Image (cartoon, grey):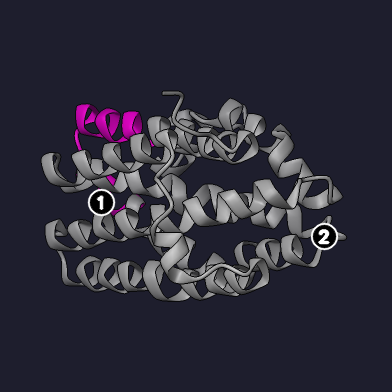
Amino acid sequence: MSDTPSPLSRSFTEELWGGIASIFEAILAHPFIRGLTDGTLPEEAFRFYVIQDALYLRDYARALALAAAKAPQEQAIAMFCHHAAGAIEVERQLHESFFRDFGLTEQQVRATPVAPTNLAYTSYLLRVAYAEPFHELVGAVLPCYWIYQEVGTRLATRGSPNPLYRRWIETYGGEEFGRVVREVLQLTDRIAEALTPAQRAAAARHFVTTSRYEWMFWEMGWRMERWPV
């Protein structure tokens, strides 16, 4: 008898990650990500990315707050409320340190136009947040947590000659952020136990879509994407 586990024995989050294996490999191979560790990423591109990420976080925090409002259990309500605040407070502190390095004011950041990919990603998140049930919203917000943690963990073993990039890597590859992500993964597996196959499939579709948007976000930063007209 084979000791290989049946696919049915995999957790829901393992199934989700298996469904984006090629997307994640494309992310790791992207020149923006490679440039963080070998120091070849132009600082102008990193500056563009950091500003857009700060603008993204405003709407991501709204999506997390709506997840809290839709959550059926108190533990999930408290968790997503805490994470929504963290998206504004903790990560904003990191961005503000970069803003000082780049000589940017908060007013300059807020006056920056939202790039097309950024607007598309956040618009998708907020549509799911307002229109779809809780389990689908969890599927949509999960890649931003999980992919960043996985990228940070992989890059942390390589480091970076650039102190700005090293600070970014250490934030997302650190244990504190890892604990946050594990908390969300555990919740995802718990709620999946009560889902029908159709409901699981719906959550997985959102997970794949926003994972693709994660690749597109780094591509946006690499190209310093502007509106074409």
x and y percentages locating residue 42 in the rendered image: 76, 46
Q: What residue sits 41% from the left and 41% below the top?
A: 118
Identify the image quadrant of residue 175: bottom right
Inspect this view and state whether residue 193 appears. Answer: no
- Which region of the structure is painted magenta? 189-207
Does residue 218 appear to the left or right of 121 in the view shown?
A: right
Quadrant including the C terminus? top left
Residue 25: image location, x then y, percent: 66, 32
Nearest to the observer: residue 37 or residue 97:
97
Give the class, few, some or many, for how many residues have Cα within 10 Å of label 1's Cα (few <14, many ≥20). Answer: some
- Label 1 SS: helix
Is 206 a magenta residue?
Answer: yes
Q: Residues within 10 Å of mark 2 (few under 14, many from 20)?
A: some
Prevailing secondary structure of the magenta residues: helix
Q: Which mark is residue 73?
A: none
Give residue 39's position: percent from left, percent from top.
Answer: 84, 51
Give the x, y percent position of residue 144: 45, 49
**Quadrant assignment, res 50:** bottom right
Q: Name the residue type under label 2.
A: Gly
Quarter of the picture containing the N terminus is top right
| Mark-to-mark CA distance, 2 and 1 | 36 Å
Q: Earlier in the sequence, mark 2 or mark 1?
A: 2
Residue bearing the label numbered 1: 191
Question: Position of 207 compared to 150: left or right?
Answer: left
Q: Which of marks 2 and 1 is in front?
A: 2
Q: Do the residues labelled 2 and 1 touch (CB within 8 Å)?
A: no
Residue type, numbered disc 1: Ile
Image position of 49 with respect to 226: above or below: below
According to the picture, the residue beneath numbered tag 2 turns out to be: 159
Q: Looking at the picture, tell me which residue is in the foreground, 83 or 16.
A: 83
Question: Callout 2: helix, strand or loop?
Answer: loop
